[in-house]
Image: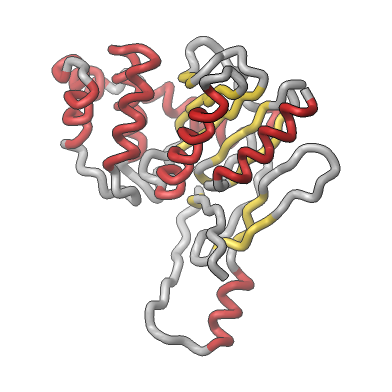
Amino acid sequence: MNEEHPQSESLSTQKTLIQTLAVPLSIVIAGALIAGAVLFGLRGNTTPPTAVVPNAPVAQDAGGTLENMKPIAQDDHIRGNPDAPIKIVEYSDTECPFCKRFHETMKQVMGEYGDTGKVAWVYRHFPLDQLHSKARKEAEALECAGAQGGNDMFWKYADRLYEITESNNRLDPTELPKIATYVGIDVAKFNDCLSSGTYAEHVANDLENAVATGGRGTPWSIFVAPDGSKLPINGAQPYEAVKQLIEQNLKGS
């Protein structure tokens, strides 16, 4: 089957065995059976579709509740119209390969629905320290860019970082000031901000809120419908799935 399934990074460290040599069919079947399932919540009584994720960490019991989501405020990083009827709040890890994929999906979403003011994208931090030791400092780098250049600069820096990172903790830290130069902010001020740890607490608070809402892997997103109800978007859902959810809720608004 050629269908590509959405995937996510697990919060707890787990070992995944990837076999590149030929293996007995029985082992392949067993591996498929123990692979994690990703849930995409749909509004109403429609049964949420699930997809098997091969060679990905098993999703954990979410716990928490979506109602614990910190209210969207002016100090959030919002792409699009802050008063849009639909808001997607993403908790993301800059070194997560599935976040890199979902970042492109959300850019596509905003290209269709952001310019018309129908959808707003809210970005929050969810660095998975056990998997990506560099992600927390990279999250602070995004904040330092935003502090110097405002909301637009935050997004420019984020777009460039996700563009060049190879993911899985492989981005050289020396690239962070290079990105600052690329997007056009003062590198000396950026380096001072990054070394000071000014935004360490902010990143930690985002992470804490992600877990409180039930997040156990990245990307973890919360879909806020026009009526204020919240639905989970777990993993790197494809554009078509996100679009379907948006259209369904726009019709009901």
In depth, the one of 87 and 204 nearer the eye is 87
Is 77 rendered above or below residue 90?
above
- Residue in view at x 39 percent, y 50 percent: 131
Q: Residue furthest bottom?
A: 24
Q: Where does the image place residue 189, in percent across and percent down from the top left? A: 19, 15
Q: Tell me what residue is drawn at x 58 percent, y 87 percent.
A: 26
**Residue 188, above or below 252:** above
**Which is nearer the eye, 51 or 134?**
51
Q: What is the quadrant of residue 45 in the picture? A: top right
Q: Which quadrant would the N terminus be assigned to in this image?
A: bottom right
The residue closer to the viewer here, 215 or 116, is 116
Q: Is residue 182 left or right of residue 14?
A: left
Give me the residue at 50% from left, 44% from top: 218
Which residue is at the front of the view, 38 or 63?
38
Which residue lies at the image location 63% right of the left edge and 26% below the top edge?
69
* Total tally of numbered discs in the picture: 0
> Residue 79, image x and y in percent?
48, 21
Q: Position of residue 123 (x, y in %)?
A: 48, 27
- Colour pattern: secondary structure
Residue 60 image point, x, y percent: 61, 53
Q: Quadrant of residue 82?
A: top right
Image quadrant holding the C terminus, namely top right
Does 162 sit above or below residue 37?
A: above
Q: Residue furthest right?
A: 45
